[in-house]
Amino acid sequence: MKYFGTDGIRGACGTYPITPDFMLKLGWAAGKVFAESGRSKIIVGKDTRISGYMFESALQAGLSAAGVDVLLLGPMPTPAIAYLTRTFRADAGIVISASHNGFQDNGIKFFSAQGTKLPDSVEAAIESQLQEPMECVPAEKLGKAKRINDAQGRYIEFCKGTVGPYTSFKGLKIVLDCAHGATYHIAPNVFNELGAEIIPIGIDPDGININEDCGSTSIATVRNLVRQSEADLGIALDGDGDRLIMVDHMGEEVDGDELMFIIAADQKRQGLLEGGVVGTQMSNLGMELGLKDLGIDFARAKVGDRYVMAELKKRGWLLGGESSGHLVCRSLTSTGDGIVAALQVLQAMRRNDKTLHELKSQMQKMPQSLVNVRFPTRVDLDNYPAVQAQVDIIEGRLAGKGRVLLRPSGTEPVVRVMVEGENADLVNQFANELANDVQQIVG
C-alpha cells in the first residue's frame, strides 16, 4: 500500500503524509468508508506528543465532513482506545501516536469495531477513497463531536479487572516509568489501587519529552532507581502504553520474551493456558526451548504485532508477543497492552511466591546481538543479493548452532541485524561484522 505500513501510517511531523492537510483528507476518507453502511461513530485518542492536538482537530474535521460522529478521548493509551472502541460499540477507533518514537514523529493507527487492527481490505478501501475529491455532506448530516470525560476511570477499572478479584500487590515496591506518555495519568492509579507502593517517573508530559531517555526503550533510569530505592522491580512502558520492559530487584532487564515465558509458565501451572505461544522471528531461542521443556507449543510469526495476532487467530491460541515487550493476552484484551501484561507478571509472582528474578531465571536466554543500521530512506534488501551472500557466510560460521536474521523495520528507515548463538563474544562479533557489511553494500 502507498500509506499504510505494518503499524499504520507513521513519519516525521510536517513531512507528507504526516501533515494537517493529509490528516483532514484521511479523516474524511476513513469516514466515507465506515459510513457506507449508515451513520457511523468513531473514537479518536492520542498520546502526549505536541502534534497530536493539531492532528486530532484535522481528523475530527474530516470525519465530521464525511457525516461521522466523533468521540474524543484525549491522551489515552493505545490499548485503552481499542478497549473503549469495543465498549462504546463504535465502528472504529483511531489512535494518533508514533509509539516509542521521539516527539518529532507521529502517526495514525486504526482499530476495528472489535478492537483489533483493520483488515488489509479496509485499509485498501481507505487508500482508494483518498484518491477521490473531498466533498462535504449537507450541513444537516455533518458528524457531531463529543468528548468522553470518564474514559480514564473506565480503563483503570478494566485493567484492575484483569487480575483476580482478591489479588493485592501490597508489600511490593515498584518503580514505574510512564515515558511521559499516554499512561502518565493511568498506570500509577492502577498499581496504587491494587496495593503496590509506586515510585512514579515519566509522568510529566510537556508534548516534547515523550520517550526521551525514558520508557521501555531507555531503561537506565528505571534500573538505577530500582537499585537505589531497593525496589522489588521496575516497569517501563512506552509512549503509547502498548509495550513494556521490566527490571528485577537486581537491576537486570526482563524483556518481552522473558515476560511472555513467565506468563505462559504461570498459566500452564494454573491450567489456564489455552494452546501455545506465538513469538516472532526475533524471539530468543531460549524462550522456545524453555517452553518446550514445559510442554508448551511455540510458533514464530513475522515481526509486528499484526502478524503475531494473525498467527494467534489462525491457531486459536491466546498468548503471544515480541521481544520488544509488545505482549498480547487475547483472553483479556484485543491488542498489546503494557499495563495488562505487567499485571499478569505481578500476579504470577504472587501466585508462585517468587521474585521477578526467580521467575525470569527459569528461562535461559541464548546470547543474542541486535544492531540497527540506519539509512536515509527505507531499504529493500531484495535488491542487494550481496547482502544475502554475507548472511550465508555468517550462518556457515555458526555451524548450525545459531540464527541470523536481517529485517527492515516497518516503522523507520532501519535494517535490524540479529545474530544468535551459543558464544556471546562470537555473536557480538558476527552481528557487528554483518552490520558493517550491510552499511557498505547498501550505503
Image (cartoon, helix red, strand yellow):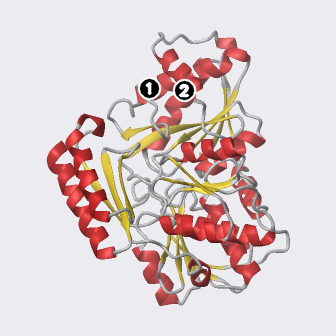
- Tell me if I can see residue 236 in this picture: no
* Residue at 72%, 85% in the rendered image: 353
Name the quadrant containing residue 271.
Answer: bottom right
Q: Is residue 411 left or right of residue 312?
A: left
Place of residue 400 in the rendered image (x, y in percent of width and height, measured from the top left): 37, 62
Name the quadrant containing residue 19.
Answer: top left
Residue extending farthest to the right is 166
Distance Cα–Cα, label 2 vs label 1: 8 Å
Classed neighbour count for the residue bearing mark 1: other residues with Cα under 10 Å, few (<14), some (14–19), many (≥20): few
Q: Which numbered disc flags the more N-terminal residue, 2 or 1?
A: 1
Q: Nearer the viewer, residue 404 or 272?
A: 404
Q: Is residue 158 left or right of residue 355?
A: right
Which residue bears the numbered disc 1?
1
Q: Is residue 30 left or right of residue 91?
A: left
Q: Quick check: marks 2 and 1 in contact, CB under 8 Å?
A: yes
Residue 131, labelled with which disc?
Answer: none
Which residue bears the numbered disc 2?
123
* Residue at 54%, 85% in the rendered image: 249
Question: Tag 2's secondary structure?
Answer: helix
Residue 263, compared with residue 4, is above or below; it is below
* Residue at 42%, 30% in the rendered image: 20
Residue type at mark 1? Met
Place of residue 397 in the rendered image (x, y in percent of width and height, measured from the top left): 27, 63
Question: Tag 1's secondary structure?
Answer: loop
Q: Quarter holding the C terminus?
A: top left
Classed neighbour count for the residue bearing mark 2: other residues with Cα under 10 Å, few (<14), some (14–19), many (≥20): many
Q: Nearer the viewer, residue 326 or 78?
A: 326
Residue type at mark 2? Glu
